[in-house]
Every structure is written in structure tokens, then in C-alpha cells.
């Protein structure tokens, strides 16, 4: 195992300054950015406990309630602290995200440097992590604080574990357990960390040698390393079960019902390849990549074959290039919780899910390149120039990607340019325009939404409301006619009919249709509101003075 000692050097300090400067140069503009309409509303603006700042009631709420289908109390606690220190100033929340990203970048560099002794390779991996466009979503989106915060605890856990392997003690192992638990309380995606520690045992910590003797002998040598981690595996199981139950109870897994097991496996295999492609060529990035209407099992099978073939090749090369095995399976393993085997939400993949997994790919590529160039001094000079150009290109691309997060409308419009058939994003943009009094601009978005996603009933209701608001009652009535043909017994259909009837002044029909909507769906609060408006209008007309 490499020594964990070794003080800071001038070159290490230079790397730290360079990495921090690069992150700040890319993200400095976020201090003037707004909260975005997408999840920031639910996590921050609509949550009274957050707006009140750091209170005892807020702390209890953070640890006892779920937020947007997740339980991540430390992330919510960080929002409470932000609000206490700076109020609900968006720029302050953004700056904290950037500061956490800087901390993660520096910690990743120092961790790899101490475990491997390879300063330049560690610096390049950290530089990729710092400037890659796929990480913009995790840093520039306040609602993704859980990514940057949980990764901070992940890297601290790896550091504590490496220190424990050098000088085992109960206190050091307890620190590993505590840091792991804190990471899970920031984001449950860290459940694969015990498996990641086993990879580090192989390389670079050197606790598991790949000696002759076959797979059985290797498993025998790995057994004590697995057993020593039983507290971590127990925490992983408990967190996984709790997360599954929370997301199922809060309705986050509705998309799972629409996909068969084979379709989920096919999408997962294809997503592994998509992420690799986006890592190499990070263009056309969006906040939402919707599931395709049809998932090809043939394409999924081919993708799975490629992933398995690459894995077999990495295993065969493991004796001579152990970093390939650690890097590749770091990538595959840390993506498992979000790869879609249990489908949460309606996205096929997401940029933010690569915040930790890309570290593995970067390790494999950078260390393989270094070994390849070790005996080629002339090629090293060329490779250094190309690496600098590539990092500069990634930085420029990230700088532009950050700009799309300055406000909700810019973010949604860009996302629709990349994925025009994303129903959630189109609905969010139309709703944003409606809330800003731009109903006429919202109408074509609602029309496009219901054309591409006719089962999106909320879109139909909002289309009727928007048409009525701009005075196009004839258009609204046509939509209701179409809706009656598609879903005659739906509560949303009756509500839409009630809106049109009320717009025409037909109180009796409006009352009948709103009551029908409530009988089907008693929780449809907007139908109850409409009924109150009908009664108020009727009372106002009855009390008005009659003409002589």
C-alpha cells in the first residue's frame, strides 16, 4: 500500500490553486442566478421551514419528514443554515454549491495523490471532475445540493478508510461508519460505497492481490475484507430498503409500472453507453431526457453485450493494469442505484447521476494513458498539449452550460431544444409563463404537450384554463369535446367542462360538472374552488338591483 503520509509539496499547492481557480472561473456567474422553477420551488420557496431559517422545528422537520420523494436530512439542514445566514437570496445558495464543488475537487486530488503517489495523474483526474460539463447540473442547480454534499462525505469516508487500513483502530473505523452514514443522509445514492471500498482494497491500497490460484483463491482472500465491512453493508441494506419504501409510498416509482423488467434492463444497458458517450462528447445536455415511447430490447441486448465484453476485457487486464478494474467497476457500480433497474421518475438518464461515477472512468483513462506514455518521452509532450486543449474545451463548454441555469425560462427553453418531447419540461415552461401572466404564450406549449402526451391530464386542464383566460372560449370548448372523446369519465374532463361552462356564464352546468369531478376525485381542490366561484357569482347576481 502507498504511504498515506507525505506532506504538501509546492506542485500540490499549485494544483490546488489551479483547480480552485478553474471551478471559480466557470461558475462565478451563479451568484447572480435565480432559483429555478424545477424542484427549487418544492425544496426551498414553497417550504415554510426553509424560509424561516435554522429553527428547532425546522431541524426536527428535516430529520422526520421526506421532501420530493427523498429523505436527506443533512441536505435540508444545509438549506436551513443558508436561509438563516443569508435569507432566501438565491445567489448565496448557489455560491455554497460552488464552494462544495471546489472542496470536492481538492479533496479528490489530495486523496488520489496520497493513495497512489501519482501527483500529475491525480491532478488530471481532479481537473476533469472540476470542469466537466456533465457536472454543471449538480453544481448550478440549488436543488442538487445533495450531489455535492453527499460527495464531500463520500470522499471523506474514502480518506478515513485509507487511513484506517494504514493504522487500524476502533476509533478510525468508527469514523468511517459515521462519515458513510452522514453521506447517506445527504443522498442515498451512496449505498454502493462498501463495494467501492473493496475496489480500493485491490487498487490502489493493495490489500487484495491478484495472485495465481484462480477465482476460488481470490474469493478466499477477499472474504476477510468483506467481513470487516459488515457494519457498512448493514447500513447499505437499511438505507436501500428505507429509500425504496419512501419512494414507493410517495409515488416516485409510478414509471416502474409502465416498464417491464426487460425494458428496464435494456434502458439501463443503453444508459451505460450513453453516459460514456456524453463523457467523451458532452453536447446537447438537458435537465431532462424523457424515456422514449418504445425501448428496443434488441438495442438493449447489444448494449448489454458491449458492457459485458468491456468488463471481461478489464478483468483479463487486471493483473497488469489494476487501475482499469477499479476505475471501470467504480463507474458501473456507483451508477447502479440510478441506472433505472428500479425506475424513479420519467427520465431515461440524467447528467447529475455522473457526478461520482465519472471519477472511475477518469481514473481508468488517465492512469492507462500515463502507463502508455511512460516509455515514450516524445509522445508525452504531445499528450500534455492535447490534454490541456481537451480540459480547456471542457471548461468552455461548461461555461456555456452554466449560462442556461440563470433562470427557469432559459433552462426550459434550452432543454426543449435538446429534448422537444419532454412532457414535464414543456409543462413546466407553460406553467411558468402562465404564472407570469403570459397565458397566450403558454397555449401553444400546452397544445404541443397534449398532442405528444395525451395521457398527461394536467396538461389538458391547463390548456382549457389558458384558452378561457385569453377569451378563446370556442377553442376551449373544442378541447373539452376532444377530451370527452378520450376520457369521458375522468375527473379532469368534468372539471374542464365546468371551466368552459362557467366562462360562458352557465352556472348550472358549471356546478353540475364541478360536482361530478369532485365525486370522481374528491381531492381535486381546483374543482372545489370553482364551485365556490360559481356560488359567489350566483349570489352576486341575485343581490344586484333589478332594472325597473
Image: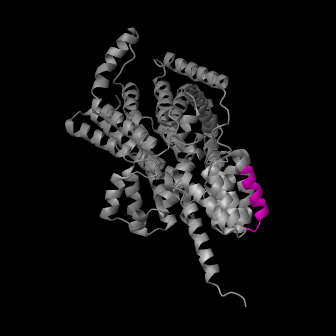
| Image spot of residue 189 (x, y percent) | 44, 40
Does residue 23 belong to the magenta stretch? no
Does residue 479 belong to the magenta stretch? yes
In the image, 172 versus 298, the foreground residue is 298
Furthest residue toward right: 474
Q: Visible in this render: residue 408?
A: no
Image quarter hosting the N terminus: top left
Residue at 36% x, 55% y is 62
| Image spot of residue 375 (x, y percent) | 55, 25
Furthest residue toward bottom: 548
Q: Is the magenta stretch mostly helix, strand or loop?
A: helix
Q: Visible in this render: residue 73?
A: yes
Furthest residue toward top: 213
Q: What stretch is highlighted in magenta?
A: 470-483
Left or right for 170, reference 354 = left
Image quarter hosting the C terminus: bottom right
The quadrant holding residue 228 is top left
In the image, 292 versus 469, the foreground residue is 469
Q: Is residue 36 positioned above or below 151 on the image?
A: below
Furthest residue toward front: 548
The quadrant holding residue 298 is top right
Residue at 59% x, 33% y is 271
Q: Identify the image's colour scheme: rainbow, by chain, secondary structure or one colour.
A: one colour
| Image spot of residue 22 (x, y percent) | 54, 52
Amino acid at each position: 500500500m502507498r504511504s498515506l503520509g507525505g506532506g504538501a509539496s509546492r506542485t500540490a499547492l499549485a494544483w490546488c490553486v489551479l483547480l480552485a481557480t478553474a471551478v471559480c472561473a466557470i461558475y462565478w456567474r451563479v451568484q447572480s442566478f435565480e432559483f429555478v422553477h424545477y424542484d427549487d420551488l418544492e425544496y426551498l420557496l414553497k417550504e415554510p421551514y426553509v424560509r424561516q431559517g435554522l429553527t428547532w422545528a425546522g431541524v426536527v422537520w428535516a430529520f422526520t419528514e421526506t421532501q420530493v420523494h427523498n429523505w436527506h436530512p443533512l441536505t435540508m439542514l444545509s438549506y436551513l443554515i443558508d436561509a438563516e445566514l443569508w435569507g432566501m437570496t438565491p445567489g448565496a445558495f448557489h455560491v455554497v454549491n460552488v464552494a462544495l464543488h471546489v472542496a470536492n475537487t481538492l479533496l479528490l486530488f489530495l486523496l488520489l495523490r496520497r493513495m497512489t503517489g501519482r501527483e500529475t495523474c491525480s491532478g488530471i483526474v481532479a481537473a476533469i471532475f472540476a470542469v466537466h460539463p456533465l457536472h454543471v447540473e449538480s453544481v448550478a442547480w440549488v436543488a442538487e445540493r445533495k450531489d455535492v454534499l453527499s460527495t464531500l462525505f463520500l470522499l471523506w469516508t474514502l480518506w478515513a478508510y485509507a487511513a484506517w487500513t494504514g493504522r487500524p483502530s476502533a476509533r478510525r473505523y468508527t469514523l468511517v461508519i459515521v462519515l458513510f452514514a452522514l453521506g447517506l443522509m445527504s443522498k442515498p445514492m451512496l449505498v454502493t460505497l462498501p463495494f467501492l471500498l473493496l475496489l480500493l482494497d485491490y487498487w490502489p491500497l493493495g490489500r487484495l492481490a491478484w495472485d495465481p490460484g484462480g477465482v476460488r483463491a481470490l474469493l478466499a482472500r477477499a472474504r476477510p475484507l468483506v467481513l470487516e465491512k459488515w457494519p457498512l453493508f448493514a447500513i447499505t441494506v437499511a438505507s436501500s430498503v428505507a429509500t425504496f419504501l419512501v419512494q414507493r409510498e410517495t409515488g416516485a416509482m409510478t414509471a416502474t409500472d409502465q416498464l417491464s423488467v426487460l425494458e428496464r434492463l435494456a434502458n439501463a444497458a443503453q444508459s451505460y453507453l450513453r453516459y460514456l458517450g456524453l463523457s467523451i462528447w458532452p453536447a446537447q445536455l438537458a435537465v431532462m431526457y424523457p424515456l422514449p415511447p418504445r425501448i428496443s430490447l434488441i438495442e438493449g441486448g447489444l448494449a448489454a453485450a458491449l458492457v459485458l465484453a468491456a468488463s471481461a476485457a478489464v478483468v483479463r487486464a487486471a493483473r497488469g493494469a489494476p487501475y482499469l478494474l477499479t476505475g471501470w467497476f467504480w463507474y458501473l457500480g456507483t451508477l447502479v442505484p440510478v441506472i433505472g433497474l428500479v425506475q424513479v421518475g420519467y427520465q431515461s438518464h440524467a447528467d447529475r447521476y455522473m457526478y461520482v461515477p465519472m471519477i472511475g472512468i477518469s481514473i481508468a483513462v488517465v492512469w492507462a494513458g500515463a502507463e502508455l506514455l511512460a516509455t515514450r518521452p516524445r509522445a508525452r509532450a504531445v499528450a500534455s498539449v492535447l490534454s490541456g486543449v481537451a480540459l480547456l474545451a471542457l471548461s468552455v463548454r461548461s461555461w456555456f452550460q452554466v449560462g442556461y441555469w440563470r433562470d427557469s425560462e432559459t433552462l426550459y427553453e434550452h432543454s426543449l431544444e435538446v429534448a422537444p418531447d419532454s412532457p414535464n419540461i414543456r409543462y413546466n415552461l407553460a406553467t411558468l409563463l402562465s404564472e407570469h401572466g403570459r397565458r397566450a404564450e403558454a397555449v401553444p406549449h400546452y397544445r404541443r404537450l397534449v398532442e405528444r402526451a395525451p395521457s398527461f391530464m394536467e396538461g389538458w386542464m391547463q390548456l382549457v384554463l389558458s384558452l378561457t383566460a385569453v377569451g378563446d372560449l370556442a377553442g376551449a370548448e373544442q378541447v373539452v369535446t376532444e377530451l370527452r372523446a378520450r376520457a369521458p369519465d375522468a375527473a379532469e374532463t368534468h372539471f374542464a367542462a365546468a371551466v368552459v361552462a362557467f366562462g360562458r356564464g352557465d352556472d348550472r352546468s358549471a356546478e353540475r360538472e364541478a360536482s361530478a369531478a369532485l365525486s370522481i376525485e374528491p381531492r381535486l381542490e381546483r374543482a372545489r374552488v370553482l364551485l365556490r366561484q360559481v356560488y359567489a357569482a350566483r349570489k352576486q347576481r341575485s343581490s344586484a338591483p333589478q332594472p325597473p
